[in-house]
Image (tube, rainbow, N blue to C red):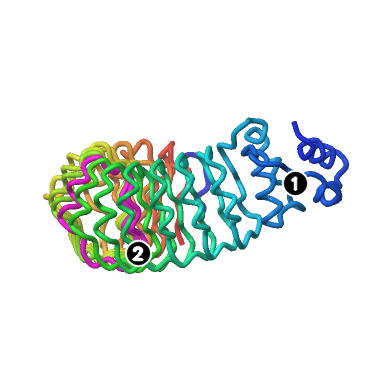
């Protein structure tokens, strides 16, 4: 830290194109409102159905915006994608069922309270997004969408997942975050095609052991729930890469967690752990472990085997020391031990040759040990709110050190 201070091609499309140049899109759509749409003859093409759908839903004033979003699709003979997000729509016309070529339907950020039964006719639909609406239930018709691969229904008012979900045999991604779910039916855990599930911000208190069926799952988000227990079968999710358990009421992690040898990120902040399972040392792919704000008083052995780990957050716990018999992951780049009860910097820190950020704020440390001078890559050192009376001069000689955060 030498010399550095320490511091803390249809008429509609042509009309829409002209409107974008003149800036009068509402006028052009109003003038065209009844010119062609009502006189269309059956059988209607999917593009004609598209325009009738827009008219029936009272969206002709927003046609320019809708065309701009769907421009490349509308030029085709068949409509494969439809984006009607953020238009304050309160209902969907039953005509939606005539758009049989739809592969992707985006209805996010509207005011929908129901969906038409005709939605079940879209047998080629692979992507359905109805996030941020006011739906209180999942319509049974959705379960007729045999081609569906992604279903996003987050930020609604849904209280349960009804029977029938098991019919979506091709579903790969299921997002139900920020609803009012109390439990997850066993049928969901039989969808072995699932790879990503988000159930965050619900009121789920327990998980069925059947969750272990989802052996191809790579992402599971359970944060902000009411979980008090994880079943041992969580260890069957051998392809899992990210597990988010933040803001629950878990007193511990099951020993089977060590079977998740492909897990790269584990978020477990704001739970009630007192320790970590011994098996955690088997999680050789783990790169980030976040255990902020638990009740951890000691650490398990075997962590020296976790050579992929670069970030370890143990802040806000009750560690008084790290026993000499316990090692830390050797390739850590960031270590956060702030908000514990440490009276000295753990000796294990001396072996962390790749460490770039070390946070020790809010402990009871009385001195900075000289072995920190050997941390050649250390850039940031946090030592606020300790019992330090002075700082060692060697901090000035640490060339990589950019910032010392202190009182």
Q: Earlier in the sequence, mark 2 or mark 1?
A: 1
- Residue on which disc 2 sits: 247
Decide which of 380, 334 is in the foreground and name it: 334
Q: Main secondary structure of the magenta part?
A: loop
Q: Is residue 265 magenta?
A: no
Coordinates of residue 274 in the picture (x, y in percent): 20, 64
Residue 22, how many percent across, how many down? 88, 42
* 103 versus 248 height, above or below: above
For label 2, the crowd category at 10 Å Cα-Cα, with few meaning under 14, some 14 to 19 and many 20 or more, is many
Rendering coords of residue 161 (x, y %): 35, 62
Q: Which residue is mark 1?
A: 37
Is residue 363 in sight in this rendering? Answer: no
Residue 225 within the magenta-colored segment of the rendering: yes
- Rendered residue at 41%/54% (across/down): 382
Q: Disc 2 vs disc 1: which is toward the camera? A: 1
- Nearer to me, 47 or 314: 47
- Residue 174 placement (x, y as % from top left): 38, 50
**Residue range (magenta):** 217-246
């Amino acid at each position: 830290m030498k010399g550095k201070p320490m511091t803390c091609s249809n008429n509609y499309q042509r009309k829409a194109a002209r409107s974008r140049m003149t800036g009068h899109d509402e006028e052009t759509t109003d003038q065209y409102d009844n010119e062609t749409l009502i006189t269309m003859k059956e059988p209607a093409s999917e593009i004609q159905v598209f325009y009738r759908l827009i008219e029936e839903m009272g969206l002709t004033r927003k046609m320019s915006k809708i065309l701009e979003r769907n421009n490349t699709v509308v030029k085709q003979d068949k409509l494969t994608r439809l984006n009607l997000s953020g238009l304050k729509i309160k209902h969907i016309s039953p005509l939606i069922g005539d758009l049989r070529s739809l592969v992707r339907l985006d209805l996010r950020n509207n005011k929908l309270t129901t969906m038409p039964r005709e939605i079940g006719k879209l047998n080629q639909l692979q992507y359905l997004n109805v996030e941020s609406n006011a739906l209180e239930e999942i319509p049974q018709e959705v379960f007729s969408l045999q081609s569906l691969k992604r279903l996003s229904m987050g930020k609604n008012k849904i209280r349960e997942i009804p029977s029938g979900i098991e019919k979506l045999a091709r579903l790969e991604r299921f997002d139900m975050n920020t609803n009012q779910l109390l439990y997850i039916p066993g049928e969901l855990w039989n969808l072995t095609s699932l790879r990503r599930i988000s159930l965050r911000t619900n009121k789920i208190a327990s998980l069925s052991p059947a969750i272990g069926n989802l052996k191809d799952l790579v992402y599971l988000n359970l944060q902000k729930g009411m979980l008090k227990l994880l079943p041992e079968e969580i260890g069957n999710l051998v392809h899992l890469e990210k597990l988010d358990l933040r803001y629950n009421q878990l007193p511990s992690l099951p020993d089977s967690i060590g079977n998740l040898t492909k897990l790269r990120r584990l978020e477990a902040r704001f739970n009630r752990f007192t320790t970590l399972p011994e098996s955690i040392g088997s999680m050789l792919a783990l790169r980030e472990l976040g255990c902020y704000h638990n009740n951890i008083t000691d650490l398990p052995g075997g962590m020296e085997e976790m050579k992929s780990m670069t970030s370890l957050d143990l802040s806000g716990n009750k560690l008084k020391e790290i026993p000499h018999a316990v090692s830390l992951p050797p390739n850590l780049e960031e270590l956060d031990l702030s908000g514990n009860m440490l009276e000295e910097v753990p000796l294990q820190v001396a072996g962390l040759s790749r460490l770039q950020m070390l946070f020790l704020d809010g402990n009871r440390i009385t001195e900075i040990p000289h072995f920190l001078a050997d941390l050649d890559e250390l850039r940031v050192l946090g030592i606020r709110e300790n019992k330090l009376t002075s700082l060692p001069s060697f901090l000035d000689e640490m060339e990589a050190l950019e910032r010392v955060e202190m009182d």
